[in-house]
Structure formats: C-alpha cells, structure tokens
Image (cartoon, grey):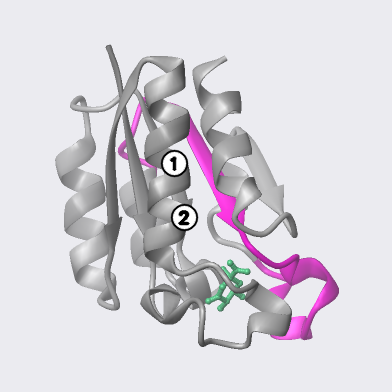
Amino acid sequence: MKKILILNGPNLNMLGMREPEIYGHETLDDIKGLCLEEAQKLGASLDFRQSNHEGELVTWIQESRGAVDGVIINAGAYTHTSIAIHDALRLLECPIAEVHLSDPKTREPFRHVSYIEPLAKIHVSGKGAAGYTEALRALLA
Ligand code: DQA
C-alpha cells in the first residue's frame, strides 16, 4: 500500500471562515475527509497534517524521507518565503505535488514566487478543495 503525506501550512486551519470568496467554504477537516475517501478508493494510506510553524513543517518533511511514496504540500504563505521548506523538500526522493486552493499567480505580486514550484512534479492551483484529490490521483497514477 502506497503511503502519502499531505502537509498544510499556516492559516489553513482557518479554512471555512477564512476569506471564503477566495478559499471556498470547506474546512480543513472537510478536505481531509475528501482526501481520505479518495485515498481509500485508490488503495493508499494517508497522513494529513497542518501546522502554523515553519520548523514543524521542516521536521515533518525530514521525517518523511524514505518513509512515504509521495508528499502533497500546500505550504500557504510559506510557499512564497520559505527557503527552509524548499531545502527540506530537496531531501526527498519521492514525488512532490504542490497544491493551492486559489491561483496565487493571478493574485498579488508577492504570491507569484513559489519556492516549492521547481521541486514539484505536479502542480494544482485554483481548483479549491478538489485540487487536493486531483493531486492525490496524479501522484498515485
Ligand atoms: C494558498 C495561497 C497562498 O498565497 C496563501 O498564503 C495561503 C493559501 C492557497 O491555498 O491558495 O495561505 O496556499
């Protein structure tokens, strides 16, 4: 059974109440439920996590080295700032999928840079919660 780690960065625990016109009405728990359902259909096991702390995300990425078959990451605002998360992801040999609920490239200029983009094999943006399950299918294809 393939193991997938899904990581969510800062403020994604506030989904549902956080700018729903941008991020949608689903909570992170709703998204977790969708992902667990999809993983079950695809015969994969899933570890779904969220942290507001850069270092915690870095530690989780380090611990996943050699332990999972793929990582899906929505690093939130750390996407645009974190060389530490970029460096941790460089340690991985498994495929990485970058997911965003919104499409950062069509938003403020400070969201146009992604330190994750060059390391990810799969990119899904602007599809809301459905982007997570799309990334999961693509990783497991
Ligand atoms: C986000 C986009 C980021 O720019 C933002 O900081 C987030 C959420 C998204 O899923 O659309 O926190 O990653």
Image quarter for ligand 1:
bottom right
Q: Ligand 1 near label 2 (Cβ, under 8 Å)?
A: no
Furthest residue in direction right, as rendered: 106
Q: Is residue 95 magenta?
A: yes
Q: CA distance from mark 1 to mark 2?
A: 6 Å
Instruction: Specify whether residue 103 is in view.
Output: yes
Circle 1 SS class: helix
With respect to residue 82, does 31 lie above or below? Answer: above
Neighbourhood count class around disc 1 (C-alpha, 10 Å): few under 14, some 14–19, many 20 upward: many
With respect to residue 24, does 7 lie above or below? Answer: above
Which kind of residue does numbered mark 1 sit on? Cys
On the image, the x and y values in percent for residue 38 come to 47, 31
Chain part drawn in magenta: 90-113
On the image, the x and y values in percent for residue 110 come to 69, 83
Which mark, by number, is residue 82? Answer: none
Which kind of residue does numbered mark 2 sit on? Ile
Circle 2 SS class: helix
On the image, the x and y values in percent for residue 43 come to 37, 15
Q: Nearer the viewer, residue 4 or 33?
A: 33
Neighbourhood count class around disc 2 (C-alpha, 10 Å): few under 14, some 14–19, many 20 upward: some
**Label 2 belongs to which residue?**
31
Which mark, by number, is residue 35? Answer: 1
